[in-house]
Image (cartoon, rainbow, N blue to C red):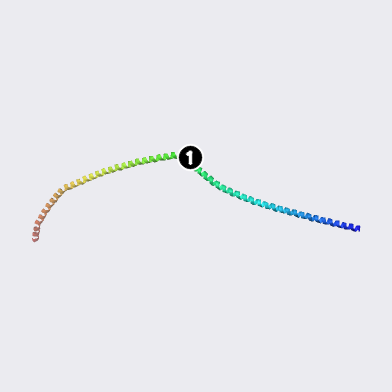
Amino acid sequence: MEVLEEEELKNMRAHQEEFDQIRAAELAEAQRMEAAEVRRAEEKQRRVEQERERVANERTVSKKVAARGFAHRYVGDVVSEVFGNMEETGFFYDPLVKEIEDSFMPWLLGGVTSSINGAREAHEILEQAVVGALKLSASKNKLITDKYNELQAEANKAAEEAKEAEQPEEQAANEGEGEGEGEGEVQAEGEQPAEGAAETS
């Protein structure tokens, strides 16, 4: 009886040990699976946090880029306007350009003005000389024309006087020619009977 009890106790211990081993293995597996699940959950949570941080960083960067672009454009416009106003008011200037505007241009304009005035005076003097020459030429032409007309009138008068002097001579010559022609006619008439007598004989 004791042997059976010992054997039964031995079997019970063996089963208990096997059960404890199985239970320990199951517990270890459960703990391992739980640890793996925890690790997966932690990894998932970590990745979610990383994604959130990435999205937040991207939004922050986008906002910074947009703000920087807006600020750059705004500041650029403001700076351009400010510099333009400063240039217009003469705050910035080129020393060479300023020297040209302040010294060279007035000197050049003065020289050009003097040259123009001198040219205008020379033109006026030349115009007066031309007008005087034209007046002198006109007076000379008038004198020449008057002298020519006077000589022409004298020549015409001399021609008329010569013509009048020739008229008596022509009349005398014409009268002499008329008398000669009369004598010839009388002689011709006296000769005609002689010719008739000759014909009769």
Amino acid on which the number 1 mark rests in the picture: Lys
Taking 25 as reference, is 166 left or right?
left
**Can you say which quadrant of the picture contains the C terminus?**
bottom left
Which of the pair 45/89 is nearer the observer? Answer: 45
Tell me which corner region of the image, top left, top right, bottom left or bottom right, holds residue 128: top left
Taking 53 as reference, is 70 left or right?
left
Tell me which corner region of the image, top left, top right, bottom left or bottom right, holds residue 142: top left
Which of the pair 33/68 is nearer the observer? Answer: 33
Q: Position of residue 32 (x, y in %)?
A: 76, 54
Q: Residue at x 62, y 51 (%)?
A: 59
Q: Position of residue 120 (x, y in %)?
A: 37, 41
Q: Position of residue 95 (x, y in %)?
A: 50, 39
Which of the pair 156/61 is nearer the observer? Answer: 61
Q: Residue at x 50, y 44 (%)?
A: 85
**Can you say which quadrant of the picture contains the N terminus?**
bottom right
The residue that mark 1 highlights is: 98
